[in-house]
């Protein structure tokens, strides 16, 4: 039976994609559920598998082509047997010979002599700069083009401002050091920083709903829930999977979800529905060593929190100079919808929740 392989249903916001390299050639045996080709969209890379075992009988759309949902791209013959291609053994190449002219023959007999081997030419030293000056041109991927479009749209549309603060993470680190072993044994997840930041952020967003809202035409859309986008760096670029109803989740559920996002982002296993929506985003440049930055909005969201590297710094506590693990925080926001007072107060609420995590976890 000839089985057509088609592009899967995408989503309302994604209507096309680009086929990447085919993993099988025509005539190859294809196991059931084996991935035939990857489809790159502007949000994620999807795998297109063969629903049944068979032989790849036809490739209708070449790699690099743009395709749409439900378009037929290949045919698998579920009843054919794969053709075994014979191994090609290169024939031994005989040395090239030539026949001497009569004037050079011995006793008039023709004599074959081997053709002279060309003498290697010694490369002359170059007077130009040393080192490679090669260049290569690669087309932007759909994902990278979409990232560029969205970020430029944010700059062109929103009135972006950034407010900064710093947070003393000694209390959070003390909690982690005390309970991390028991936490991992009980919940099967490491107790990281992100869960504390997520809880503190959700608390702040519920106190300052404008930071969790968005502009739609001439209206402001407020959300009674916190769908937090967590920026994850992958080999193909930045993706922002959404943690739905983060305000209802405990530390363990948050840690498991974020770890799962990171693994599946690098394995190209995130679904389109996991990348759509979101009311707020958190990005952690500190994992790459960033000391301070101004994160950019992820439209149509109106704010984004930037985390940075933790450094031991001298600070004044109760009139004494002490060394504490400090992190700079940055909150970029759309001034069209969020006033400076709300933005500064929201970031300060996040800071207070992290510096007093006991009150945060007890909902005080």
Image (spheres, grey):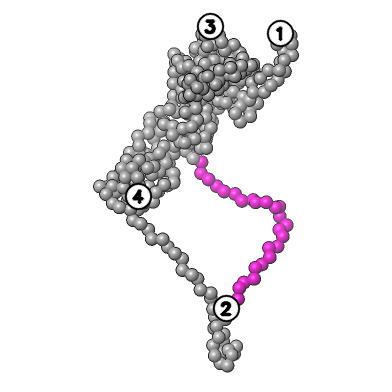
Q: Earlier in the sequence, mark 2 or mark 4?
A: 4
Distance in Å between CA atoms under marks 2 and 4: 48 Å
In reply to whether residue 258 is colored magenta, the answer given is no
Indicate the secondary structure of the residue bearing disc 2: strand
Res. 29 mark: 4
Does 203 appear above or below 56?
above
Cβ–Cβ under 8 Å for marks 2 and 4: no
For label 2, the crowd category at 10 Å Cα-Cα, with few meaning under 14, some 14 to 19 and many 20 or more, is: few
Q: Percent position (x, y) of residue 81?
A: 30, 52
Distance in Å between CA atoms under marks 4 and 1: 73 Å
For label 4, the crowd category at 10 Å Cα-Cα, with few meaning under 14, some 14 to 19 and many 20 or more, is: many
Residue at mark 2: 114
Between 84 and 130, the one lying in front of the other is 84
Q: Percent position (x, y) of residue 303?
A: 53, 20
Residue at mark 1: 318
For label 1, the crowd category at 10 Å Cα-Cα, with few meaning under 14, some 14 to 19 and many 20 or more, is: few
Instruction: Write the start and end of the magenta stretch as one range.
Output: 115-140
Q: Earlier in the sequence, mark 2 or mark 3?
A: 2
Q: Earlier in the sequence, mark 3 or mark 4?
A: 4
Name the chief secondary structure element in magenta: loop
Cβ–Cβ under 8 Å for marks 4 and 1: no
Residue at mark 3: 364
Indicate the secondary structure of the residue bearing disc 3: loop
Q: Percent position (x, y) of residue 133?
A: 64, 51
Q: Percent position (x, y) of residue 263?
A: 48, 32
**Residue 335 in which image quadrant:** top right
Does 242 appear above or below 58?
above
User: What residue appears at the point 63 percent right and 25 percent down from the top-left corner?
Assistant: 309
């Amino acid at each position: 039976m000839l089985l057509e392989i088609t592009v899967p249903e995408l989503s309302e916001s994604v209507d096309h994609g680009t086929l990447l390299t085919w993993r099988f050639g025509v005539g190859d045996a294809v196991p059931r559920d084996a991935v035939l080709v990857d489809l790159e969209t502007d949000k994620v890379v999807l795998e297109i598998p063969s629903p049944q075992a068979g032989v790849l009988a036809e490739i209708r759309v070449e790699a690099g082509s743009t395709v749409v949902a439900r378009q037929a791209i290949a045919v698998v013959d579920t009843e054919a047997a794969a053709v075994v291609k014979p191994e090609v053994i290169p024939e031994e190449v005989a040395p090239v010979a030539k026949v001497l002219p009569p004037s050079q023959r011995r006793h008039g007999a023709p004599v074959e002599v081997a053709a002279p081997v060309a003498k290697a030419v010694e490369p002359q030293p170059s007077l130009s700069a040393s080192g490679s000056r090669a260049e290569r041109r690669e087309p932007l991927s759909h994902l990278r083009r979409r990232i560029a479009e969205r970020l430029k749209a944010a700059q062109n549309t929103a009135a972006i401002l950034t407010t900064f603060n710093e947070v003393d993470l000694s209390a959070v680190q003390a909690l982690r050091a005390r309970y991390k072993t028991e936490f991992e044994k009980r919940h099967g997840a490491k107790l990281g920083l992100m869960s504390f930041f997520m809880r503190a952020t959700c608390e702040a967003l519920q106190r300052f709903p404008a930071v969790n809202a968005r502009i739609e035409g001439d209206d402001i859309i407020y959300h009674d829930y916190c769908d937090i986008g967590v920026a994850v760096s992958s080999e193909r670029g930045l993706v922002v999977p959404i943690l739905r109803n983060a305000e209802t989740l405990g530390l363990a559920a948050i840690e498991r979800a974020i770890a799962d996002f990171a693994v599946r982002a690098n394995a190209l296993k995130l679904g389109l529905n996991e990348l759509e929506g979101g009311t707020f985003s958190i990005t952690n440049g500190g994992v790459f060593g960033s000391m301070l930055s101004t994160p950019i909005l992820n439209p149509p969201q109106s704010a984004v929190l930037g985390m940075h590297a933790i450094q031991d710094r001298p600070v004044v506590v109760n009139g004494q100079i002490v060394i504490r693990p400090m992190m700079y925080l940055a909150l970029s926001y759309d001034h069209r919808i969020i006033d400076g007072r709300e933005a500064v107060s929201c970031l300060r609420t996040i800071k207070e929740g992290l510096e007093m995590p006991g009150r945060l976890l007890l909902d005080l």
